[in-house]
């Protein structure tokens, strides 16, 4: 398994996890906005919003990690 292939698979798996986390956070946030939040200081809504923001930030950083894979060559020994 080549290094570039491994990195593409790893980054793809991490991107899928990030998308799943973002979708779960968005689902919780929408559910809380529809049903209302009975927790003190609307803590559940705040935590769902924080989950959306953190998931989006991590997803962005993972996606930015894809860029070097397409532009940089792997290190090879000189002849």
Image (cartoon, rainbow, N blue to C red):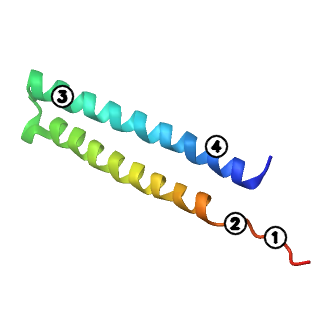
Contact (Cβ within 8 Å) of mark 3 with mark 4? no
| Residue bearing the label numbered 3 | 30
Query: Which badge, 3 or 2, is on the more N-terminal residue?
Result: 3
Relative to residue 45, is residue 17 drawn left or right?
Answer: right
* Label 4 SS: helix
Query: Which badge, 4 or 2, is on the more N-terminal residue?
Result: 4
Q: Give the position of the C terminus as an image quadrant.
A: bottom right
Q: Residues within 10 Å of mark 3 (few under 14, many from 20)?
A: some
As drawn, the label of residue 73 is 2
The spot of residue 76 in percent (x, y) is 81, 70
Q: Please identify the residue farthest to the top as the structure is shown.
A: 35
Front disc: 3 or 4: 4
**Which residue occupies 7% across, 41% down?**
41
Front disc: 3 or 1: 1
Relative to residue 68, is residue 47 drawn left or right?
Answer: left
The spot of residue 9 in percent (x, y) is 64, 43
User: How far separated are the C-alphas under marks 1 and 4?
Assistant: 21 Å
As drawn, the label of residue 9 is 4
Is residue 1 or residue 51 the one in the foreground? 1
Relative to residue 75, is residue 47 drawn left or right?
Answer: left
User: How far separated are the C-alphas under marks 3 and 2?
Assistant: 43 Å
User: How far separated are the C-alphas under marks 2 and 1?
Assistant: 9 Å
Q: Residues within 10 Å of mark 4 (few under 14, many from 20)?
A: few
The spot of residue 7 in percent (x, y) is 65, 51
Front disc: 3 or 2: 2
Front disc: 1 or 4: 1
Contact (Cβ within 8 Å) of mark 4 with mark 2? no
| Residue bearing the label numbered 1 | 76
Question: Taking 37 as reference, is 72 above or below it?
Answer: below
Question: Taking 2 as reference, is 51 above or below it?
Answer: above
Contact (Cβ within 8 Å) of mark 2 with mark 1? yes
């Amino acid at each position: 398994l080549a290094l570039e292939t491994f990195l593409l698979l790893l980054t793809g798996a991490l991107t899928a996890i990030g998308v799943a986390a973002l979708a779960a956070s968005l689902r919780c946030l929408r559910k809380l906005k529809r049903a209302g939040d009975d927790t003190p200081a609307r803590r559940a809504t705040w935590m769902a919003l924080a989950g959306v923001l953190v998931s989006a930030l991590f997803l962005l950083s993972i996606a930015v990690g894809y860029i070097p894979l397409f532009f940089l060559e792997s290190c090879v020994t000189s002849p």
